[in-house]
Image (spheres, helix red, strand yellow):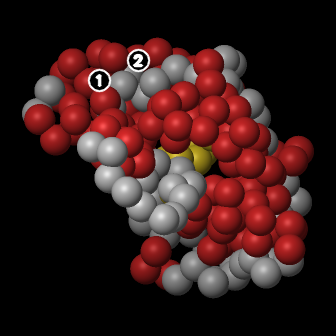
Amino acid sequence: MYAVREGLQKFNIPHNFEIGSIIYQYAKWIREGTLPVNSDWNKDLKVKFTVQDPCQLVRKSFGDDVANELRYVVKSVVGEENFVEMQPNKSNNYCCGGGGGFLQATGYTEDRREYGKFKLQQILDTGAQYCITPCHNCHSQIHDLSDHFDAGYHTVHLWTLICLSMGMLGENEREYLGEDLKEVNL
């Protein structure tokens, strides 16, 4: 999304469509009732979640507006009482250190992990068992940080939790879930 948006602007490419984030669509569909998510699955489990605000999506593109919509979606899926906010957050959130995918793709593993220590500590400070990532680059980085530093939290894609909350997440789509969620809504 970010690359298309920037490319259209940088090269002044005429187009007759609007670039937006799927986060806006998820929020709209949840409000309309066409995306029937439900947080009841987590009422008794009380699994705690935090969310990563991707630089490309929030700080460089749509700002706190999309960050607020992201929180609406997350709370609708996991329960407001099970959401733990990072500090700082939204447009002021720390970068994960993945460099928009650049550092993962170019082999700067140790540099990437060193930059990621700020994000790692920020996640750990929440006490959440899961970090939700709406960006695949953030997911790769944050997952690697947990594994490499034996941090103990799980990294999960937003769409995974949306599907889990609707009872339609397949058994083979639970790779990033911990044992506490592997069998939920199967």
**Could you tell me how far apart the alpha carbons at marks 2 and 1 are, in whole angstroms?**
6 Å
39 vs 139, left or right, is: right
x 41%, y 17%: residue: 117
Q: What residue type is disc 1 on?
A: Arg
x 69%, y 65%: residue: 26
Tell me whether the residue at label 2 lies in contact with that at label 1, contact meaning CB atoms closer than 8 angstroms: yes
> In the image, is residue 116 above or below residue 76?
above
Nearer to me, 181 or 55 = 55
**Residue 174, image x and y in percent?**
49, 69
The single residue placed furthest to the left in the displayed view is: 107
**Residue 141, image x and y in percent?**
35, 37
Q: How many marks?
A: 2
**The label number, if any, that marks residue 117 in the structure image:** 2
Q: Secondary structure at mark 1?
A: helix
133 vs 163, left or right, is: left
The picture quadrant where one finds residue 84 is top right
85 vs 140, left or right, is: right
Q: Secondary structure at mark 2?
A: helix
The residue where tag 1 is placed is 113
Badge 1 local density, few (<14 within 10 Å), some, or many (20+)? many
